[in-house]
Amino acid sequence: MDLNDIRDCFRLDNDDHFAKTELICLENSHNMIGGSAIPPSYCQSVGDLAKRELGGVSVHIDGARIFNTSIALNVPISQLCDSADSVSICLSKGLGAPLGSVLVGSENFIRLAKRARKRVGGGMRQVGVVASMGMYALQHNVNRLAEDHARAKQVAKELVAHGFRQPQGGNVDTNIVYFGLPETSNLNKYELCRALEDGFGVKIGGGYGKGGELFRICTHMDVDNFAVDRALEGIFQLCLR
């Protein structure tokens, strides 16, 4: 988000036509712009804006894939989160835990978060086994995220080379690749996901972007080199035959 756009959207509690601005949310890596790794300099600039110009508005980082950003930029997590009041981290994406997220913030913030969780029935019992899986993921699966990034870059490169539209122009920071079908494709946007799963056992997401024209591929620890080759083989056979 452009900083001037944030300034334009900011509202005080002095006009009954608008809700008071209380929070700025950032996402890192950013899903809908292709898994882009948002640098700490930008996060810091938003934090400075919130604190110095906007009267102390809180900043939250949706860090569902923030370890991907850390590996892609070779920057420690602490530096990426330095300007935030709170951060959420998903353990069940690239890190590979079967479920679970971590919410980080001040003591009072966590107290309120637990209360909010209780209100919507989000509490769990006997979660030690879940926590142990999350700890294992953090201790063993962070550095290997670079493998996912390399495979995603390979996918993007091959798609661009075969005429598929790629919003990032083939530039991929982390483990997410968006692409659109070439004009000469034999399938339409509604058919590819189903045909790819039925014929090749490969699952990708569809319906992204304006008009739902884009597809999304995510690489993760369950996707090896064979799986990447299989996915590309299926896409090329179905769309370019």
Image: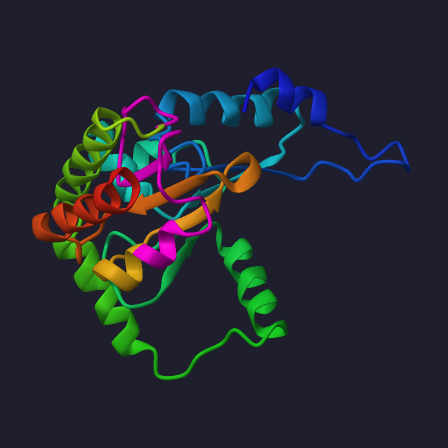
Residue 176 within the segment the image draws in magenta: yes
Outermost residue toward the bottom in this view: 126
Res 156 quadrant in image: top left
Res 8 quadrant in image: top right
The image shows residue 180, relative to residue 131, as above or below, that is above
**Position of the C terminus by quadrant:** top left
For the point 25% across and 57% down, which residue is it? 202
The image shows residue 156, relative to residue 126, as above or below, that is above
For the point 55% across and 19% down, which residue is it? 2
Q: Which residues are magenta?
A: 166-195
Q: Nearer the viewer, residue 144 or 188?
A: 188
The image shows residue 137, relative to residue 151, as above or below, that is below
For the point 59% across and 21% down, which residue is it? 52
Instruction: Give the color scheme: rainbow, by chain, secondary structure or one colour.
Output: rainbow
Res 124 quadrant in image: bottom left
- Percent across and percent down for residue 197 are 30, 60
Residue 19 is left or right of residue 234, and the answer is: right
Residue 62 appears anywhere in the view: yes
Outermost residue toward the top in this view: 4
Outermost residue toward the right in this view: 16
- Percent across and percent down for residue 95 are 23, 54
Residue 49 is left or right of residue 213, and the answer is: right
- Percent across and percent down for residue 104 are 42, 52
Residue 25 is left or right of residue 160, and the answer is: right
Residue 63 within the segment the image draws in magenta: no
Q: Nearer the viewer, residue 159 or 1?
A: 159
- Percent across and percent down for residue 222 are 17, 58
| SS assignment for the magenta stretch, majority | loop
Q: Nearer the viewer, residue 118 or 195?
A: 195
**Position of the N terminus by quadrant:** top right
For the point 22% across and 70% down, which residue is it? 132
